[in-house]
Image (cartoon, rainbow, N blue to C red):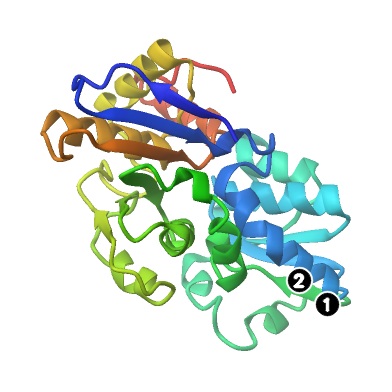
Amino acid sequence: MMIEKILDTNNRKISLYIKREDLLHPLISGNKFRKLKYNLAEARSLEAETLVTFGGAFSNHILAVAAAGKEYGFCTIGIIRGEELFDKIKDNPTLKSAQDLGMKFVFVSREEYRNKGNEGFLEDLNLIEGKFYVIPEGGTNELAIKGCEEIITDDLHNFTHVCCSVGTGGTISGIINSSHDSQKILGFSSLKGDFLSEQISNFVTKKNWKINTEYHFGGYGKVNDELISFMNSFYIETKIPLDPIYTGKMVYGVHDLIRKNYFPENAKILMIHTGGLQGIKGMNDLLRKKNKEIINYDV
C-alpha cells in the first residue's frame, strides 16, 4: 500500500508520512474495506443471502456495504436514521449511489433507530426473507477489528507514532493490537465528547494509545472554514484528497500538534488515510447552501 512522505511539516526534526488506505478500492475504501473483509467471509460461510446494516444520511459504511453486496453477490438492506430522508434519496449523493448499487432502504425515526440493538428489532420491521447477516453501524465488531489489524504490518513498526481518525473505535483498536509496544498510537475523535476510550478498551489490552478530543470541529459531520481551507491547501501541496468527516480532521490535528511541539524530536509519524472521500460531494452541497468555501477537488 502506498505510503507518501509529507514534505512540509514546519518542523525539520519531525518526519511525517501518510498511508493511503483510501486507494484500496474505489467504493469499499480504507477502513471499510478492512472492516468488511472478514465479515463478508463469515456471511458467506453462514450461507447468508442478505447483508443488513445501519447508518445515517451520509454514511461511508452504508455505501461500502452496498458496493460489497454488488461485488460479492449479496442483497443489501440499509436501516437509515431519519424518516424525512424517504423522499430525498435523489438529492443525497450517498444514498443515491447506494441505491444504484442495489441497496434497499428502510427509513426509521431517530427514536426507533436508538433501539436498533434490541432483540426483535429487525423481526418487527418484517422486511427480510431468507438468511441474513447483520453488520453493526460503522461496521465495528470482532471481525472488523481483525481486518483492521492488517493495517499495521511488521515493516511499519519503525514509525514512532501512528495517527488515525476515530468514529466507532474499530479501526484504531485493530491498529493498537498490531502495533509494536514501543509505538504511540494517537486517535483523533470526529465526535464531540470523551466516551470512545471506554469502548476501545473493550477490544484492546495494550496501553500505548490515547484519544485526542480537541479536533472534532463541533462534532460528527461538523466543519468550519478553517478546516476546509486547510484541506484545500493540503491538496494543493500534496495532491492528496482528504475527507471532511474523519481524515481531514486528523491530518489538521497532527499538523497543529507538530506546530505546538507535542511530538518529540526525531519523531517519525505515520498518518492513516481511512478513505471516506465519497462524502465530499454531499458536504459541498451543504457548504454551497451556506455560501461557504467548498472542497476544491474532485474524487
Relative horizontal placement of residue 253, taking residue 17 as reference (left or right) = left
Q: Position of residue 166 (x, y in %)?
A: 39, 53
Q: Position of residue 135 (x, y in %)?
A: 65, 68
Relative horizontal placement of residue 270, taking residue 264 as reference (left or right) = right
Please give the name of the residue rendered at 69% of the width and 34% of the height, measured from the top-left corner: 26
Instruction: Identify residue for label 2.
Output: 42
Residue 52: quadrant of the picture: bottom right
Which amino acid is tagged 2? Glu
* Closer to us: 217 or 162: 162
The numbered dot on residue 287 is none
- Please count the marks in the image: 2
Do we see residue 97 in this rendering? yes
Per the model, the C-alpha gap separating discs 2 and 1 is: 6 Å
* Closer to us: 116 or 15: 15
Q: Are marks 2 and 1 in contact (CB under 8 Å)?
A: yes
Q: Position of residue 130 (x, y in %)?
A: 88, 77
Please give the name of the residue rendered at 18% of the width and 22% of the height, measured from the top-left corner: 11
Relative horizontal placement of residue 36, taking residue 128 as reference (left or right) = left
Please give the name of the residue rendered at 65% of the width and 49% of the height, measured from the top-left corner: 33
Vertical relation: 278 (above or below) 77: above
Instruction: Identify residue for label 1.
Output: 46
Give the structural element (helix, strand or loop) at label 2.
helix
Give the structural element (helix, strand or loop) at label 1.
loop
Which amino acid is tagged 1? Leu
* Closer to us: 22 or 88: 22
Q: Position of residue 256 (x, y in %)?
A: 19, 32
